[in-house]
Image: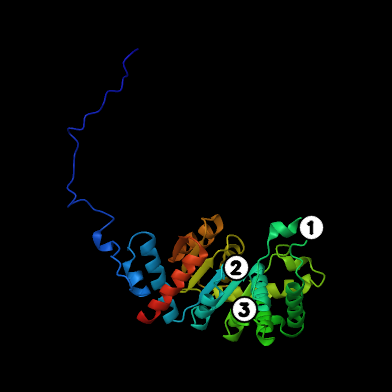
Amino acid sequence: MSDSKFEPIEFDSLNTISIFQRPSKVLVKNFGLRWKKGASFSTFLDVLPSILAGKHLQDAVSRVARAIAERKTIILGMGAHPIKVGLSPLINQAIESGFFSLLATNGASLIHDVEVALSGKTSEDVCARLADGRFGATKETAEFIHEAIREGYNNYKNKGLGWIVGRKIHEENLPYKDFSIFACLYKNSIAATVHVAIGTDIIHFHPSMNAEQMGALTFCDFRIFCRAVSTLSNGVYINLGSSVIMPEVFLKALSVSRNLGFDVKNYTTINMDFAMQYRPLKNVVERPAETGGKGYNFIGHHELLFPLFLCALFERIDDI
């Protein structure tokens, strides 16, 4: 066997540098602190290390708290899953505390919110009901929403779909309306927009579906959303668990706002989801930096991550 042409290299002449002179990215002053049993949630926030996601969370909370104190526009865009994992009471508390200027979501959120308000439960077993076509054929859910749409289209066409359904939940005093996000938004005069993609929601194949009316109302909601985005400079946009609909709607609203002459820049964005997704990363997190803004990305379970974020805001809001 022939010898290899590569001989082991010698390290004798390697140039070294003292650790006391070398720049370092991690310092003990940024480490987390020890925990004391029985301490407060505010203390827990102070215990977090000011490194990577810990630092990002602290910075994001500070930015949002400042925006709230300065009464800047703060938009919560979300998918339906936060409702399905039981976050409605905490989100309602944030709404009542004036955290959000507008909540924007998809049609599925509207359905789950209505079901909760009607019956105190939601989310059927798709696999168990799909085989014989029973999935999505729930009577009361569709009838309530489509009746609200008919009434709203005739009387409140310029209010949009989110406002109309929130009003009906509130005015009809549904048994579990205190758990309804849309009723809470209506009661507190906070804008609610629903961005429907026809064919994605169970209520679209019910006999009472009126595509013309639903389309007109969700289009009105898009225009309302565009108006809110046009005021987003120095404000905040949060994307909670929406991987396609809200990131795409946000991108178009941002473009049309600038096209119409609104100087939207220097805003903060926050994305929270179970996994890294292309559209939220590009449309929500990365693109704000192009105009002097800042984007944050947090990956984790909604039922853990968003309560942590909101509770941190509750603790920090008075410090600004």
Q: CA distance from mark 2 to mark 1?
A: 24 Å
Within-10-Å neighbours for mark 2: few <14, some 14–19, many 20+: some
Give the mark nearer the N terminus: 2 vs 1. Answer: 2
The amino acid type found where label 2 is placed reads: Lys
Q: Which of the 4 image quarters holds residue 59?
A: bottom left
As drawn, which residue projects farthest toward the right? 207
Q: Earlier in the sequence, mark 3 or mark 2?
A: 2
Q: Nearer the viewer, mark 3 or mark 1?
A: 1
Residue under label 3, please give it.
182
- In the depicted view, which residue is nearer to us: 252 or 39? 39
Task: Name the secondary structure under disc 2.
Answer: helix
Judged from the image, the secondary structure of the residue bearing numbered disc 3 is helix
Measured from the top left, where is residue 74 in percent x and y? 50, 75
Look at mark 2 in the image and give the residue it sits on: 84
User: In this orientation, which residue lies closer to the viewer: 102 or 135?
Assistant: 135
SS state under label 1: loop
Quadrant of the image occupied by residue 159: bottom right
Which dot marks residue 132?
A: 1
